[in-house]
Image (spheres, rainbow, N blue to C red):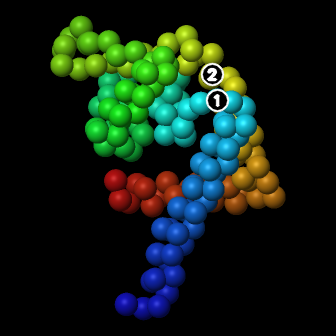
């Protein structure tokens, strides 16, 4: 394998992974400092429910790129925190729809502001053209592989 191929692999797997982990760690730290007792993984589920409440667990799997056991565990823990509730679908009682509680709705603005602040910190000094180029490349990589 040519040496430059490995370097391209480093770019995608290492750099994107490192950046993603750094952003997630900073956001988790910001939540902790604000006494918000949810994990980044739980927040990602809430985020999708804020966009569209009443999703099935299977739809949450697709939107968060997680497997079914992971979503089940996350929803279980969010239920214990009184952030979500499961409701059996009227069309198919085997399907649970996940709805936000008032406690979760109360967290939306604060956590979204923190996420925006964290992204602004992460992108400090990066010009808009570079951000758009990066997004375009990563979308193309995703589209090639999905």
Q: Is residue 124 above or below residue 73?
A: below
The quarter of the displayed image where residue 145 is located: bottom left
Asked whether residue 130 appears in the rendered view, the answer is yes
The quarter of the displayed image where residue 77 is located: top left
> What residue appears at the point 18 percent right and 15 percent down from the top-left corner?
92
Number of other residues with Cα within 10 Å of mark 2, as a class: few under 14, some 14 to 19, many 20 or more: some
Instruction: Provide the secondary structure element on which disc 2 rests.
Output: helix
Residue in front for this viewpoint, 136 or 54: 54
Q: Is residue 128 above or below residue 62?
A: below
The quarter of the displayed image where residue 85 is located: top left
Q: Specify the label residue 79 is tagged with.
A: none
> What residue appears at the point 49 percent right and 39 percent down from the top-left corner?
41
> What residue appears at the point 59 percent right and 48 percent down from the top-left corner?
24
Residue 132 horizontal/vertical position (percent) = 65, 54
Asked whether residue 53 appears in the rendered view, the answer is no
Q: Is residue 95 above or below residue 141?
A: above
Q: Is residue 78 left or right of residue 95?
A: right
Q: Quick one: label 1 or label 2, which is nearer the N terminus?
A: 1
Q: Is residue 65 above or below residue 111?
A: below
Q: Verify CB contact (< 8 Å) between mark 1 and mark 2.
A: yes
Instruction: Provide the secondary structure element on which disc 1 rests.
Output: loop
Residue 141 horizontal/vertical position (percent) = 45, 61
| Image quarter (top left, top right, bottom left or bottom right) of the N terminus | bottom left
Residue 126 horizontal/vertical position (percent) = 76, 58
Judged from this view, the residue extending furthest toward the bottom is 2
Q: Where is mark 1, residue-wise? A: 36
Q: Is residue 88 left or right of residue 113?
A: left
Judged from this view, the residue extending furthest toward the top is 90
Q: Where is mark 2, residue-wise? A: 107
> What residue appears at the point 47 percent right and 91 percent down from the top-left corner?
3
Judged from this view, the residue extending furthest toward the right is 125
């Amino acid at each position: 394998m040519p040496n430059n191929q490995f370097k391209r692999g480093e770019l995608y797997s290492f750099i994107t992974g490192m950046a993603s982990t750094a952003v997630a760690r900073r956001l988790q730290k910001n939540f902790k400092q604000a006494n918000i007792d949810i994990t980044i993984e739980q927040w990602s589920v809430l985020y999708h429910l804020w966009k569209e409440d009443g999703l099935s667990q299977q739809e949450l799997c697709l939107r968060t790129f997680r497997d079914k056991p992971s979503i089940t565990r996350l929803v279980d823990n969010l239920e214990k925190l009184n952030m979500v509730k499961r409701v059996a679908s009227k069309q198919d009682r085997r399907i649970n729809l996940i709805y936000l509680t008032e406690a979760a709705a109360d967290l939306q603005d604060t956590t979204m502001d923190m996420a925006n602040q964290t992204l602004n910190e992460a992108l400090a000094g990066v010009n808009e053209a570079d951000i758009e180029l990066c997004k375009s490349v990563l979308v193309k990589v995703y589209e090639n592989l999905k």
